[in-house]
Image (cartoon, grey):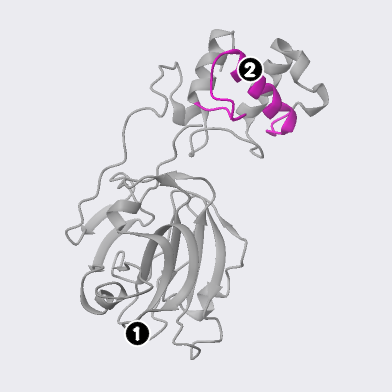
């Protein structure tokens, strides 16, 4: 499957407090247990800005609604990337937490909701006596152990691995305007094609933003692939299943095609599989 890069999920980068400054420092420094490494993102710093992801995220948990006095919680939401993401640190499911959204805003969000690329729903706020509208952000890999109080009396979103912002995200300067990176050294998103294959059509023109088609996707180009697979490899494609939906019959036929042509057998259609299909006569 083609790589999906984790992209910094705000239109403006304006980091007003690093993980090692101010009241963030007790979240991890000299703590004997439970830590995270938060940073404050103030975005445009005029009005209120949205969390606008460049990757799909699912809402794992909503914290603090109507319980602001309980255990010192403030309003927060835990998100998990829908797909494994490639970050500057490594590749895995990426967990992001956002804190300080106002109650009226967070009540619009539901557990299990998928925040698709570009979704505008989560607004920076001032819940929890925050000084000015901003997001308190953490990024993490691995198992979640809970929102726990550490030995420094700070409440932390505790995972197997806490990531710094420049470890968790690549920067896409065409998407994000940098006002203040707070001396974090961000890597720009890699510019190379995800498959290093040449193509008569650019990857972004044929595929959706994530760069590939997989089970559950609906797109006109999925219909083209399904029709080609039925005509070329009919033994592995169900005629009744043809259409613009990437269903289990198309997935099975793509897996068989990948097996026969020496590709990774994941059943998804990315740039490498597309390039191989073209060698058998597929026309975009």
How packed mark 1 is, by other alpha carbons closer than 10 Å (few <14, some 14-19, many 20 or more), is: few
In this view of the protein, which residue sits in the foreground, 160 or 206? 160
Asked if 206 appears above or below 56 in the picture, the reply is: above
Q: Is there any visible trace of residue 121 in the rendered image? A: no
User: Residue 180 location in percent, x, y?
Assistant: 20, 61
Identify the image quadrant of the C terminus: top right
Q: Is residue 140 left or right of residue 262?
A: left
In this view of the protein, which residue sits in the foreground, 256 or 244? 256
> Which residue is situated farthest in the left direction here?
183
Residue at point 45% right, 31% down?
A: 204
Residue 76: which disc? none
Magenta-drawn stretch contains 111: no
User: Residue 170 location in percent, x, y?
Assistant: 32, 47
Count the marks: 2
Query: Does label 1 or label 2 sit earlier along the sequence?
Result: 1
Q: CA distance from mark 1 to mark 2?
A: 56 Å
Asked if 204 appears above or below 123 in the picture, the reply is: above
Dot 1: element: loop
Residue at point 30% right, 47% down?
A: 171
Q: Is there any visible trace of residue 53 in the rendered image? A: yes
In this view of the protein, which residue sits in the foreground, 135 or 104? 135
Q: Which mark lies nearer to you, 1 or 2?
A: 1
Q: Is residue 118 left or right of residue 191?
A: right
Stretch of the chain drawn in magenta? 243-270
User: Residue 160 location in percent, x, y?
Assistant: 42, 60
Which image quadrant is residue 130 in?
bottom left
Q: Which residue is mark 2?
A: 257
Tell me whether the residue at label 1 lies in contact with that at label 2, contact meaning CB atoms closer than 8 angstroms: no
User: Residue 80 location in percent, x, y?
Assistant: 51, 57
Q: Is residue 187 left or right of residue 64?
A: left
Magenta-drawn stretch contains 248: yes
Q: Which residue is mark 1?
A: 153
């Amino acid at each position: 499957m083609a790589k999906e890069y984790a992209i910094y999920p705000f239109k403006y980068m304006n980091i007003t407090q690093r993980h090692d400054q101010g009241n963030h420092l007790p979240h991890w420094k000299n703590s004997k247990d439970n830590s995270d490494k938060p940073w404050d993102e103030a975005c445009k710093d005029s009005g209120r800005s949205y969390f606008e992801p460049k990757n799909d995220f699912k809402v794992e948990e909503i914290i603090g609604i109507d319980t602001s006095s309980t255990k010192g919680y403030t309003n927060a939401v835990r998100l998990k990337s829908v797909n494994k993401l490639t970050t500057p640190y490594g590749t895995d499911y990426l967990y992001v937490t956002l804190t300080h959204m106002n109650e009226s805003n967070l009540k619009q969000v539901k557990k299990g909701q998928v925040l698709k690329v570009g979704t505008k729903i989560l607004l920076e706020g001032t819940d929890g006596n925050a000084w000015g509208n901003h997001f308190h952000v953490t990024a993490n890999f691995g198992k979640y152990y809970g929102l726990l109080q550490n030995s420094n009396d700070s409440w932390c979103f505790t995972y197997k691995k806490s990531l710094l912002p420049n470890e968790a995200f690549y920067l896409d300067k065409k998407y994000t305007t940098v006002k203040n990176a707070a001396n974090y050294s961000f890597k720009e998103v890699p510019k190379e094609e995800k498959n290093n294959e040449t193509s008569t059509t650019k990857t972004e023109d044929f595929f959706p933003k994530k760069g590939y088609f997989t089970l559950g996707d609906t797109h006109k180009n999925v219909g083209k692939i399904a029709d080609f697979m039925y005509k070329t490899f009919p033994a592995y494609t169900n005629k009744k299943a043809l259409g613009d939906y990437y269903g289990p019959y198309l997935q099975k036929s793509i897996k068989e095609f990948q097996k026969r042509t020496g590709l990774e057998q994941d059943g998804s259609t990315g740039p490498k599989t597309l390039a191989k299909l073209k060698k058998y006569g597929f026309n975009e």
